[in-house]
Image (cartoon, helix red, strand yellow):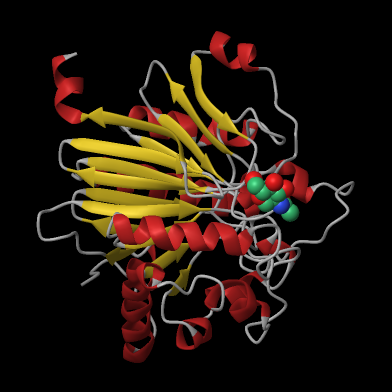
Amino acid sequence: MAPNIPCKKSRTSCVFLVLLSSVLCIVTTSAELQRFEHPTKEDGSLSFLVLGDWGRRGEFNQSEVAFQMGRVGEKLDIDLVVSTGDNFYDNGLSSEHDTAFEESFTKIYTQKSLLKQWYSILGNHDYRGDAEAQLSPLLRKIDSRWLCLRSFIVDAELADILFVDTTPFVNMYFTSTEDHTYDWRGIPSRKAYIQTLLKDVELALKMSSAKWKIVVGHHAIRSIGHHGDTQELIKHLLPILQANDVDFYMNGHDHCLEHISDIKSGIQFLTSGAGSKAWRGDMKNEEGLNKQGQRVNFFYDGQGFMSVQLNPTRAEIAFYDVFGNVIHSWTTSKLLHLIM
Ligand SMILES: *[C@@H]1O[C@H](CO)[C@@H](O)[C@H](O)[C@H]1NC(C)=O
């Protein structure tokens, strides 16, 4: 109990103050990110697909990419799917009754191997519509695979997958010159929202005992695609990832597939934002990245997706094009890191 509450008035106001203080206590300790447990396979391994920037009612090769995801998903016996945001084009969902949800999701990703839990975050295009509609439990009733929240953790035993809402970090969306409107209803104070989120991410990473630490955001930290690096994330989020042994940062936003290594920290930046419209045809200077301690291992400007296969000592990443061909793959081992 709280013995120091000054209680000069009646006994009831005293009781009220004690109740209030315990409510406040609950509010402050529940700042931790919401956690979802996802089981691994029996042998302790986990595999999943990562897709971004996709919902266009099947157009721009969305259906072709979906078909190949189904094939690869079956081959790898995937456990779940990660969506890196920009789930519905052009302007998110207009409400939780928007038929785009079924037309761009339920009726597109129909193959058996894709009938798994999908974990999604919001992209900047999703914030242009009714952002809260995508978070609504009603969508989970329409299609039980759907789970989209602003920021949360998937605890998959050998891996912690931390989803971070990156759109509110980006200054551009808050300037008056920006010609789109954004649904900031859930974010009354941008500064407080970002500060709390960064603290939550840091705490979650510090407390994580998982073998693999994965962070997922919509915006790239490092990218040589159309949008390029996100300076706000380099400044605020990257130092936390570097200090806490994060293995992979996965994102969308740039409509391409890419793999960039942070040489010093060993973080791998993996862009999977090629779920539908791609082929922007522009690429930033790779040399600049090499100078800053990054190595560009792979860049592909067309459609496709990524797969991740994990066991306690080994991770295998692969990228696929619209025909399902592997166009880049990479493996790493935890034991090797210890020896090196
Ligand atoms: C669909 O994919 C094929 C093969 O990569 C490509 O030639 C075509 O331009 C793509 N279509 C669209 C609309 O992007």
User: 288 or 114, which is in the foreground?
Assistant: 114
Where 246 falls versus 156 (above or below)?
above
Look at the image and tell me whether residue 55 can be seen. Answer: yes
Picture quadrant where residue 310 is located:
top left
**Is 133 placed left or right of 211 in the picture?**
right
Q: In this view, which residue lies farthest toward the left?
A: 43
- At 31% from the left and 73% from the top, the residue drawn is 22
Image quarter hosting the N terminus? bottom left
Look at the image and tell me whether residue 32 can be seen. Answer: no
**Is 18 placed left or right of 3 in the picture?**
right
- At 88% from the left and 49% from the top, the residue drawn is 176
Where 146 falls versus 235 (above or below)?
below
User: 56 or 123, which is in the foreground?
Assistant: 56
Picture quadrant where residue 115 is located:
bottom left
Q: Position of residue 132 (x, y in %)?
A: 61, 74
Image quarter hosting the C terminus? top left
Q: Position of residue 85 (x, y in %)?
A: 57, 57
Q: Position of residue 32 (x, y in %)?
A: 35, 58
- At 35% from the left and 68% from the top, the residue drawn is 113
User: 26 or 124, which is in the foreground?
Assistant: 124
Where 218 falls versus 111 (above or below)?
above
Picture quadrant where residue 169 is located:
top right
- At 70% from the left and 36% from the top, the residue drawn is 227
Q: How many marks?
A: 0
**Is 282 placed left or right of 164 in the picture?**
right
User: 45 or 151, which is in the foreground?
Assistant: 45
**Is 269 placed left or right of 264 in the picture?**
right
Q: Position of residue 41 (x, y in %)?
A: 16, 60
